[in-house]
Image (tube, rainbow, N blue to C red):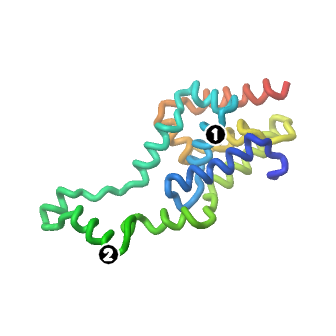
Amino acid sequence: MFERFTDSARQAVTGAQTEARALHAPFIGTEHLLLALLDGGDATARVLGEHGLKAADLRVRLADLGRTPLDAEALKSIGIDLDAVREATEQSFGAGALDSPAGRRADRKHIPFTPRAKKSLELSLRHALRLKQKHIGSGHIMLGVLHDKDFMAVRLATAAGADIGELRADIERLLLSEAA
């Protein structure tokens, strides 16, 4: 399947890995594919921008989702000083000792695709075939990423104010105009 990928589609896949690493994710999800597509600098990225999607905003949302902040005030009320615990731990075990193990592992090892991200890439092929196109471009990947309302990328785009139906239609129009 990857032999059918255009350069922009390949960049989206490798960019998703970069995004996952930067966010210290233990996996590559549809949200990372969306971020990579937003940063692609091509017509697909332009259409995404026209729908109000911005990579920086989505990164902030993802970073916030990945945090499980401890309530320092609540801990202090029972005699635990979170800053003191963090400082003592880092003095004993090194900087970043309290970072999640999954996040540290993601910086060094292969990051797998989630089943939903794999499915979105498979769907990109189906969308290309449905549109009678022999290659898979970034727009086809975007259609795959937007295919299922349960994909994190769809939830993020919706939360950012994008109308998913209109976005799909605009991406499909773009693909058809590029093929003409």
Name the residue at 36% across, 74% down.
Answer: 93
Q: Residues within 10 Å of mark 1 (few under 14, many from 20)?
A: many
Q: Amino acid at mark 1?
A: Leu
Where on the picture, by quarter, is residue 130? top right
Q: Quick check: 23 left or right of 121?
A: left
**Number of numbered discs overlaid on the protein picture:** 2
Q: Residue 98 in the image: x percent, y percent?
A: 36, 67
Question: With respect to residue 81, does 118 lie above or below?
Answer: above
Q: Quick check: 158 left or right of 97?
A: right
**What residue would you read off at disc 1?**
37
Label 1 and label 2: CA atoms lie apart by: 41 Å
Name the residue at 63% across, 62% down.
Answer: 112
Is tag 1's residue or tag 2's residue first in the polypeptide sequence? 1
Q: Nearer the viewer, residue 106 or 128?
A: 106
Q: Residue 145 in the image: x percent, y percent?
A: 64, 43
For numbered disc 2, what is the local secondary structure? helix
Question: With respect to residue 147, does 73 lie above or below?
Answer: below
Camera-near label (1 vs 2) is 2
Q: Residue 157 in the image: x percent, y percent?
A: 53, 37
Name the residue at 61% across, 38% down.
Answer: 39
Q: Residues within 10 Å of mark 2 (few under 14, many from 20)?
A: few
Where on the picture, by quarter, is residue 68? bottom left
Q: Which mark is residue 6?
A: none
For numbered disc 1, what is the local secondary structure? helix
**What residue would you read off at disc 2?**
92
Q: Nearer the viewer, residue 117 or 102?
A: 102
Question: With respect to residue 25, does 42 lie above or below?
Answer: above
Looking at the image, which residue sits at the far bottom?
Answer: 92
Q: Amino acid at mark 2?
A: Ser
